Structures are given as C-alpha cells and as structure tokens.
C-alpha cells in the first residue's frame, strides 16, 4: 500500500480521523520505512517546538505592553509635496492661494523638520543652503562632513533628475528632491524615526525609509545611476 | 486598558513566538509584533468577536511580515552595490552564526512555506485554521507543508542537527 507524504504528514499533525486515519495506521504497521518517515516528521515537529516554545515563556517586553496600552497610535508624519504646485489662483482678497498654502506647509515643516535659521527649505519648497549645496555637488557615497548624505540619483519618467537624501542635523529627516530649473524641488520629506533616538537610525540608514523608496520607485524611469552616470549628470548640471 | 487590549497583552507570548519563528531574530520579531499590535489597535473595529483573536492577529502579522520583506527587498534594490552589504547587515542577517540551526533552517525556507510551518508546527493551528489565516485553500496549505517539512529535514541534516 502506498502512502503519500501529504497523508503521512496529515497523520503526524493529527489531522486525520476515521477511515483515513485507519488506512495510514495500517500502512505504517506494515512498512518499517513508513514508520521511520513518520518518526522523522514527529522529531522535526518536536525540534521546532523546543526551539521556539521558550520565547512564549519569556515575559513580554515592556515596549510591547506599552504599545498595547497606548491604544490607537498616532499616524506617522509623512508630508508628500505635490509634484507640481498648482497654478496660483489668486482671489482678489488674498495674495495667492499657493503662497498661503506653502506658508502653512512651511509652518508644519518648521515644526516637523529641522529647518535652520539659514533656511534649508524655502517657502517655495525648494532646497536652500547646505541642502541645496549637497544636492548640487555631492556624489552618492562620498565621504563628507556634510550633514546631508545623498542616497541615490535617478532620472524620473517625466524628465528631471531626482536625488534622495538624509539630513542628519537636528532631528533629521529623509527626503527626495527633483530638479526644477536650477533649483531642487522637494517631493517628499519624512522625519527620522527611531523613538526620538536618532543616533542608531541615522548611522545605520544606508537604506531609504519606505515612503521615500516607494516614491523613488514610482517616479524612476529606470535603475538608479551608477557612479559614472551620476558624475556625468553632475557635470551636466543635473539637466 | 479595556478588554480588547487585555486580550492582546495575553496573546503577546504567542505572537512573539510566531514572529521569532518567522524572523529568527529577537529584535526584528518584536518589531513585527509591535507593528501588528499597532495595526490591530487602528483596525480593531474590523475584528469580529466570533473569530478567534489569535487568528486575526496572525493574519495581521503575516501581512506586516510580507510588507516588511517587500520593503526591504525594494530598499536593497535601491541601494548601491557598496551599500548592499550594509543593508543586509542591517536586516539582522549578520547575527546568523548566533542563531540556532532551526532558526537558520527556517530562514532558508521560502516565505510561503515558512508561514505554513510556523502556523501549524510552531503555533499548533489546525489545517483549517492555518489556511484561513493565510487565505489559501487547504490543499495549497498541505502542499506547502510537505515542501517546507521536506526542505527543513534536508537542511537540518546539512547543518548537522
């Protein structure tokens, strides 16, 4: 009598009853090889149980209990910027809707991200100061004292070159900016995470935070630039 | 804490065990549990009390784990080759030598087989329950179990266990 692995395993896992179970038991009784296979499956199950059961006997860490008792968590702060700012529709009574909107966003930014007195991000949501300088000059992976680390560079499907970056000054944030004229327009910025302790996260962050990686992937026309392509893009002024 | 939260706390040991069998790393496992717990608290009105809370939580954990793996793969794909080694190290794979042979054997399983093995052999779910958690037919579950167990036995032999 032949027995499939499926039947033997189902029997080992206690999933068979009645006639099916009796059939397997008869087959095992008649065939020592089957009995050995069954024993091997049971040994595997026992090995798995003894490997992982101790975890369930440990007291749960405080941070998990705190996560449960905190109730509904506050959503992570991610501020996506519009790809193109809408043409300013100017109500006669106000300077301009877009200006008002960017001022409001600037306030949010000022609170959420590190925007120094020198202004790393202007009210028009383009990079300024050291951020602009890094985006203009720094190559990926370059050893630098700058508080900005460039992640990857690539060409977006709709034309401009875009670069991801991490700002390590202050609370820190990660973002993605695309070339617009001779400026870098921010497309997304995500505050550095890590329970307020930015140190570990910042130094370990050779990878992009998911929202930035997602946006990069959806924008990109092809793979990220390699070193040669990036250097050429820089000498072409990122056009 | 209300009743729902107390039930979640009572489930934490099982959730941690399940997470450990998936990730093989204590910190990654607890991160996964935390993500699932936070999602559960956000979506608690989607849980129907006529279904077991642990099954619902296992489903949330499975989804969170798959999301994590996708995001990790995507980020690795975006990393420069020089940074790739670093990215792998970040994932905790550098701890490999300290892991038990079982954890290493589990790590080598494709994710669909690892989920099936973890739910049935580590968590002791019935085939019916496990296939509901994974949202797959029972026949698919059993074939993943057969392949997973066969691979595990072979790699445990290879690892000298």
Image (spheres, coloured by chain):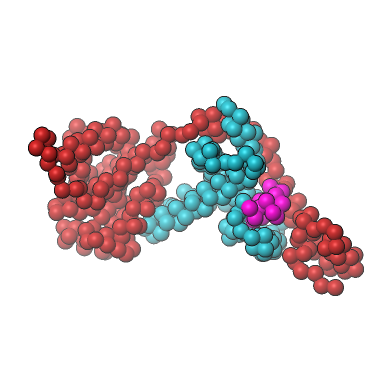
Q: Nearer the viewer, residue B33 or A202?
A: B33
Q: Nearer the viewer, residue A238 or B89?
A: A238
- Residue drawn at point x = 12 percent, y = 35 percent: A94
- Residue drawn at point x = 52 percent, y = 36 percent: B41
Residue B83, x across and y down, in percent = 39, 55
- Which span is picked out in magenta? B116-132
Question: Does B128 appear in magenta?
Answer: yes
Examine the rendering and report whether any part of residue B9 can be seen. Answer: no
Q: Which chain is cyan?
A: B
- Residue furthest bottom in the image: A1
For residue B117, which quarter of the picture?
Answer: bottom right
Please identify the quadrant where the N terminus of chain B is shown.
top right
Give the vertical position of B28 relative to A180 (above or below): above
Please identify the quadrant where the C terminus of chain B is shown.
bottom right
Residue A29, x across and y down, in percent = 90, 65
- Residue drawn at point x = 83 percent, y = 63 percent: A20
**In screen coordinates, is B89 left or right of A12?**
left
- Residue drawn at point x = 60 percent, y = 35 percent: B8
Residue B61, x across and y down, in percent = 56, 46
Tint of chain A? red
Examine the rendering and report whether any part of residue B116 can be seen. Answer: yes
């Amino acid at each position: 009598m032949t027995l499939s692995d499926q039947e033997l395993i189902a029997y080992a896992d206690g999933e068979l009853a009645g006639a099916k179970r009796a059939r397997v038991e008869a087959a095992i009784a008649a065939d020592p090889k089957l009995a050995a296979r069954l024993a091997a499956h049971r040994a595997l199950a026992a090995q798995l149980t003894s490997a992982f059961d101790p975890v369930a006997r440990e007291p749960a860490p405080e941070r998990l209990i705190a996560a449960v008792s905190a109730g509904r968590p506050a959503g992570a702060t991610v501020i996506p910027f519009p790809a193109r700012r809408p043409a300013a529709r100017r109500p006669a009574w106000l300077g301009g809707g877009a200006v008002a909107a960017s001022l409001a966003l600037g306030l949010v930014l000022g609170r959420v991200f590190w925007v120094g007195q020198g202004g790393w991000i202007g009210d028009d949501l383009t990079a300024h100061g050291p951020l602009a300088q890094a985006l203009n000059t720094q190559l990926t992976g370059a050893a630098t004292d700058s508080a900005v680390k460039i992640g990857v560079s690539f060409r977006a499907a709709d034309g401009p070159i875009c670069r991801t970056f991490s700002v390590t000054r202050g609370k820190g944030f990660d973002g993605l900016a695309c070339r617009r004229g001779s400026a870098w327009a921010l497309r997304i910025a995500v505050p550095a995470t890590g329970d307020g302790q930015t140190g570990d996260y910042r130094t370990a962050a050779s990878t992009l935070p998911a929202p930035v990686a997602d946006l990069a992937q959806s924008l990109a026309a092809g793979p990220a630039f390699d070193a040669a392509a990036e250097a050429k893009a820089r000498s072409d002024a990122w056009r | 804490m209300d009743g729902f939260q107390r039930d979640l706390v009572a489930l934490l040991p099982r959730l941690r065990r399940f997470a450990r069998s998936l990730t093989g790393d204590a910190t990654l496992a607890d991160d996964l549990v935390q993500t699932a717990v936070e999602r559960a608290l956000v979506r608690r009105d989607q849980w129907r009390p006529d279904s077991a809370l642990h099954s619902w939580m296992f489903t949330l954990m499975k989804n969170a784990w798959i999301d994590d793996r996708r995001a990790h793969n995507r980020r690795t794909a975006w990393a420069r080759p020089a940074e790739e080694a670093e990215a792998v190290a970040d994932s905790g794979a550098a701890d490999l030598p300290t892991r038990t042979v079982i954890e290493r054997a589990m790590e080598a399983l494709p994710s669909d087989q690892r989920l099936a093995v973890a739910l049935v052999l580590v968590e002791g779910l019935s085939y019916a329950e496990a296939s509901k958690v994974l949202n797959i037919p029972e026949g698919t579950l059993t074939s993943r179990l057969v392949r997973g167990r066969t691979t595990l036995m072979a790699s445990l032999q290879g690892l000298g266990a």
